[in-house]
Image (tube, rainbow, N blue to C red):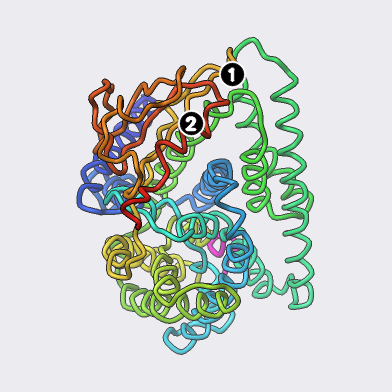
Amino acid sequence: MILNEILLITAVLLISAIILNKIGGKFGVPSLLIFILVGILAGSDGILGIHFEDYSLAQYVGIVAISYILFMGGLSVNIGELKPIVTEGVVLATLGVFVTGIIVGLCSYYLLNLPLLECFLLGAIVSSTDAAAVFGVLRSKSISLGNNLKPLLEFESGSNDPMAVFLTLGVIGLISGQLNFGGLIFDFFKQMILGIVFGYVIARLTIIIINKIKLEYDSLYVVITLASVIFTYSFISIMGGNGFIGVYVCGLAMAAGKFVNKKTLIKFHDAVAWLMQIVMFMILGLLVNFKAGFVHTKEAFLVALVLIFVARPIAIFLCDVGFKRSLKEKLMISWVGLRGAAPIVLATFPLTANVEHAVDIFNIVFFVVIISVLVQGTTIPYVAKLLKVDAPLEQNHDSVIEYGDKDPNNKMIEFTVSDNAAAAGKQLYELNLPQGTLVSLIYKKGEYVIPTGSTVVEPCDVLFVLMDKTKENAVREILCSENKEQNA
């Protein structure tokens, strides 16, 4: 009976979290906050009064969840968008995290009644950012970020958790006396190199297996990728590497490769990543003793102020010295330093390692994340518009334009009509598209429209054209070329 009750409560909490997230999205409330709130309401201080204090279990769930989230983060990357910003992203994800952690640690030493190494531990724990929360807020307001800011922040957020994990475990090792500073530096390079190399190799092997095995049931390909993520993290960790950077690199390498049922697998892992986020956030909400932790809000507020207005901006401006970014872009990158579930998961590591002030650190970190979400998460769309770095949100139409590969000469391609395109304002029949091409669908003002010859093409319309792939350039010239008379 107890098992049935647990299953029932779990199902109700998951559905409630999704419904509340939908409602909260209309008001710009980040999903992270909604999911944690559901956990708090179900916890010992909430409506259901569920008593949960298993930090080890929460840590294990967090590790598995972050692994799948990072894998999906890598798998969903547009490799073409990544290339121009990869160097900048690596610098932000490594040096940026390190500088942020150091500044927070030093400031915390003067603000909090904690030993120096434990202050650096606090800084390491809160040093990484959360991409899912950031772009969930942007999507809810139907805006994005221009000039490669979006892929940069996605790449930084997806790849900076491993650095935060390394710093957290490294400082715990210094506190326990198991590591010294020289060993810490050596361990950093060893973990990163092994994580990157093995992550790439496992990705290539996974692609080979998927393409060569020829399974009778397509669903079994999903099982292979699910197992591959867990294998990647656990194998690399056993070998002494950083498992988190390994699963992220594995996702990136698979995103760059070609394999059977790629779109289907990406959709499935997107759903898995969402499930992992919800479960992880709710467990972390259950874990916190909200009433007892509330006494740490003053310390958390001070640390959050340092993190948001001092540490993150200094780290960004320092790391972006060699890159051609405007002041407004640097300010936007600084503001999009939203903290998420990773710091709360990392805050369980000192608890399981029996660090002296681990409970205080956990409570401070929890409220720092809440403050960051409330202050930054709810204002990101407005700051983007204020700094004029916002751009129209590009819709994902993958589920609409999927088309069978039985005829290799036929392709379904989407074309977005720009503001000053020559095609804008004309009816479809006036465009004189090449023979053998068919505009089968138009995404217009948030709706999918089946067009006729008299349908007017407007700026920002997305046209889905079925054609012989040899005619792609001709169609692109008609639909996307600029209006020369308007530019004259």
Q: Is residue 268 visible?
A: yes
Position above or below: 123 against 447:
below
Q: Tell me which corner region of the image, top left, top right, bottom left or bottom right, holds residue 7.
A: top left
Residue 126 disc label: none
Residue 401, image x, y percentages: 43, 26
Residue 139, image x, y percentages: 33, 48
Type of amino acid at the residue the image marks with label 1: Asn
Write the start and end of the magenta stretch as one range.
349-356
Is 472 displayed left or right of 167 in the figure?
left
Q: Identify which residue is drawn at 72% across, 52% down.
A: 195
Verify whether residue 432 appears in magenta: no
Viewer-nearest of labels 1 and 2? 1
Return the disc, 1 or 2, that comes first in the chain's sequence.
2
Q: Which residue is mark 1?
A: 409
Q: Tell me which corner region of the image, top left, top right, bottom left or bottom right, holds residue 444.
A: top left
Question: Residue 76 versus residue 183: which sits nearer the camera?
Answer: 76
| Label 1: element kind | loop
Q: Which residue is mark 2?
A: 267
Question: Residue 434 versus residue 352: which sits nearer the camera?
Answer: 434
